[in-house]
């Protein structure tokens, strides 16, 4: 059965086995629809019971045939995943401590920290060079144009 995800619009298919499982679930829970989960966005798209039964009208007979087929040709269970090797801490590995002082490691740059005593970048250096000399920290005043924009006297 072909389905299109109602959220990301990705088309995907429900296999015969998935359809049988879905119909069993809908029947056992007396549900009006089955939620098919999209393989891309993992959201549920509701499929009405009538639409599924339209694609597999004799699904109960199909289920019995499938059960007989599985008894005749049993499937091996999937092997369990191998356990991970001993933990990193048990191997005696300890992370290096962060450097202390004025110098900063490259790892600090990834954490959103700025190095101490250095300008933020080229743009900050250009801004510093563009400032007129005068009072330190005071904003530069623009020359007055034809009209005064200040208070009325």
Image: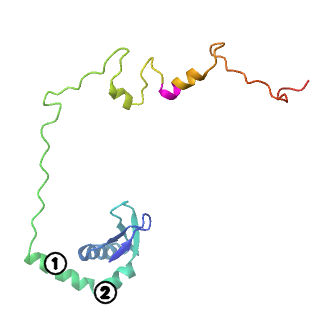
Of mark 2 and mark 1, the one earlier in the sequence is 2
Q: Is residue 144 left or right of residue 65?
A: right
Q: Position of residue 69 (x, y in %)?
A: 12, 79
Q: Quadrant of the C terminus?
A: top right
Does residue 125 lie above or below 43 as drawn? above
Q: Nearer the viewer, residue 50 or 100?
A: 100
Along the viewing direction, whichever of 144 and 120 lies nearer the viewer: 144
Q: Residue under circle 1?
A: 67
Within the image, what quadrant is residue 148 found in? Answer: top right
| Figure label count | 2
Would you say residue 121 sits in the magenta stretch? yes
Q: Position of residue 47 (x, y in %)?
A: 39, 74
The label number, if any, that marks residue 11 in the structure image: none
User: Where are the magenta residues, as a range?
Assistant: 120-124
Under tag 1, what secondary structure? helix
Q: CB atoms at circles 2 and 1 under 8 Å apart?
A: no
Residue 57 circle label = 2
Dominant SS type (magenta): helix
For the point 48% across and 27% down, which residue is it? 122
- Which residue is the extreme one toward the top? 135
């Amino acid at each position: 059965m072909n389905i299109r995800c109602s959220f990301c619009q990705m088309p995907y298919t429900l296999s015969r086995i998935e359809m049988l499982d879905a119909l069993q679930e809908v029947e056992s829970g007396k549900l009006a629809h089955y939620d098919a989960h999209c393989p891309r966005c993992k959201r549920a798209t509701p499929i009405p019971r009538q639409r599924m039964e339209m694609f597999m009208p004799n699904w109960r007979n199909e289920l019995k045939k499938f059960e007989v087929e599985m008894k005749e040709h049993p499937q091996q269970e999937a092997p369990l995943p191998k356990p991970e090797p001993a933990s990193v801490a048990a191997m005696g590995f300890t992370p290096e401590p962060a450097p202390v002082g004025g110098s900063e490691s490259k790892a600090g740059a990834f954490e959103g920290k700025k190095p101490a005593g250095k300008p933020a970048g080229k743009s900050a250096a250009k801004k510093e060079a563009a400032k007129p000399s005068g009072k330190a920290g005071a904003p530069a005043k623009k020359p007055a144009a034809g009209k005064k924009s200040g208070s009325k006297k």
